[in-house]
Image (tube, helix red, strand yellow):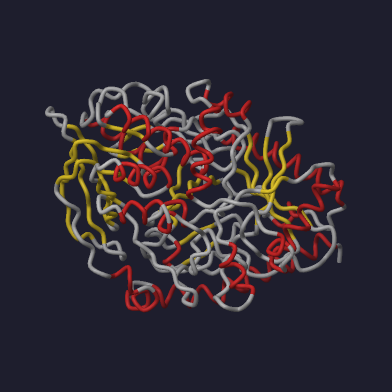
Amino acid sequence: MHRRAFFKAAGLATIAGAVGTTLTTTAAAADPREAMFRTWVPEIFEPIPDAPAHTEAIVIGSGFGAAVTALRLAEAGIANTVLERGSRWPNDPWREIFTGDDLPDGRGFWHRTSFTGVTKVPMSFGKFGGVLDVTEYPGIDVWRAAAVGGGSVIFTGAMVAPERKLFDHVFGGVVDYGELERVYYPRVREMLRLDPMPADIYQSAPFAHSRAWDDQVRAAGYQPVANDSIFTWDVLRGELAGNSRASATAARSNLGNSNGAKFDLNQNYLRYARETGRSQVYPGHRVDAIAQEASGKFVVTVTKLAPTGQHLGTRTLTCDKLFLGAGSVGTSELLVRAQATGALPNLNEHIGDGWGTNGDVVLARGASAVAGQGQGVPSASRIFDASGVPLTLENWYIPGIPFETGALASLGMVLDSTRARFGYHGGGVGLSWSAGAQNAVVDAARAVDHRIAERAGAVAEYGALGYDANAQFTAHPLGGAVLGKATDAFGRVHGHPGLYVMDGAAIPGSTATVNPSLTITALAERNIAAVIGAGR
């Protein structure tokens, strides 16, 4: 049999067989049987305290921008309440706190019963309040977090600064790149202990795919650049030595690392904020609406949720200052709804604008030799290509496949200028993404990946497997309340003093061909410093 046909037939048959036999059992066992989840993760079923009725400041969300805001407010003596709809998940070196995305259960997904990821293999499971919310819009699926710690729990750990020229192209002079480079990128790197993958980890068996990926791009004339990462390398060393359940070395990332291999926000910003005694995170608190009274006080409507999704009550909370850090989708939904309903009547015409996908594309090419490649998660390296549309390809593991395929995966991030707008229709907030724009992004990234495969002598064409560039999704939603348009240059929302945007909603659809997490965090550091310094 021709090698391509063999890979397609054998690979898809194995996927279908594994999923078909195992997931039926998972779905049947997980259905509303809360006892199983209580056994696995009893901590998230502990009674959820009520948030205080009034706080000087409320921070909505607990991801990168929100966590920075909570800490810096607390350090400045400003008491703040952090509201997070998801649960506070623990870590344990031996328990499987989180599920894998090869054969997931409800711990993985936010109140849904099915998921089709980058492999295009449908999976079913019992409904539960898991860590990944997949929001489906016409033309695009958006992956976003639902957990204390936000996106830091479910991302792949790469934190990379964009090139100055491309950053300035995207931000149009609203943000001084030199200031980020001098002050705020270094501050974040220190806080999050960012560093590239050490040689001993890179040379270990689970990262054979990283070495093979680097070999191929070198054969194609590129020089791979090491990525700074948020992973704690000693935890990976413990996995390799058998001192912890395998996680980051065994394809666990998109739905969380049970052993705390990721140095996520629960281990730094949020922890430090709590230790001041002036900041507290309240999980299970979903914010449904925001408004501002004539007095200037903000009103936040909250539904308290059990991990099973049961509504435990609805309350209204108040604050003097309101900081939005619910992510691009969450923050934009709150603002667009408040504008449409008159709850925030002075918002300007730019609310909801400037949304983009950061040019996300998933790709796979064959290895140059048939050999086990490993499934280590942290991304070791990347390349940049400006032969056409500027783009980055980043070394990636293959999520959702529990066996070796011989494929080398990449996450592409293309400098895409297409933007969408959130709208309010029939009581809901939504958007549509252009199929043409997505196809253009896919074509640009696929052309570079295919050229690498040809020059490196890849043994299989993975487009035939239906995996390559076949998922219409983004894990990096950005925009909806853009700096310099919906807000001033530091996130102060026009028309409503005391209201701020501190997350990816403030970024104009792209972080210039790199992962957004470092830039979101650095901008939050910059913006909250300006807000606190000016007293407004």
Q: In the displayed structure, does residue 45 sit left or right of residue 466? A: left
- Residue 267 spot, x, y in % from top left: 43, 58
x 45%, y 63%: residue = 108
Q: Quadrant of residue 386?
A: top right
How many numbered marks, from 0 up?
0
Residue in the foreground of this view, choosing between 78 and 308: 78
x 42%, y 66%: residue = 107
x 23%, y 32%: residue = 341
x 36%, y 56%: residue = 271
- Residue 300 spot, x, y in % from top left: 21, 42
Residue 246, placed above or below residue 500: below
- Residue 465 spot, x, y in % from top left: 71, 57
Q: In the displayed structure, does residue 287 sit left or right of residue 195? A: left
**On the rendered image, what quadrant is the N terminus found in?**
bottom right
Q: In the displayed structure, does residue 419 sit left or right of residue 337? A: right
- Is residue 8 in sight in this rendering? no
Residue 453, placed above or below residue 519: below
Residue in the foreground of this view, choosing between 30 and 293: 293
- Residue 418 spot, x, y in % from top left: 55, 29
- Is residue 87 in sight in this rendering? yes
**On the rendered image, what quadrant is the C terminus found in?**
top left
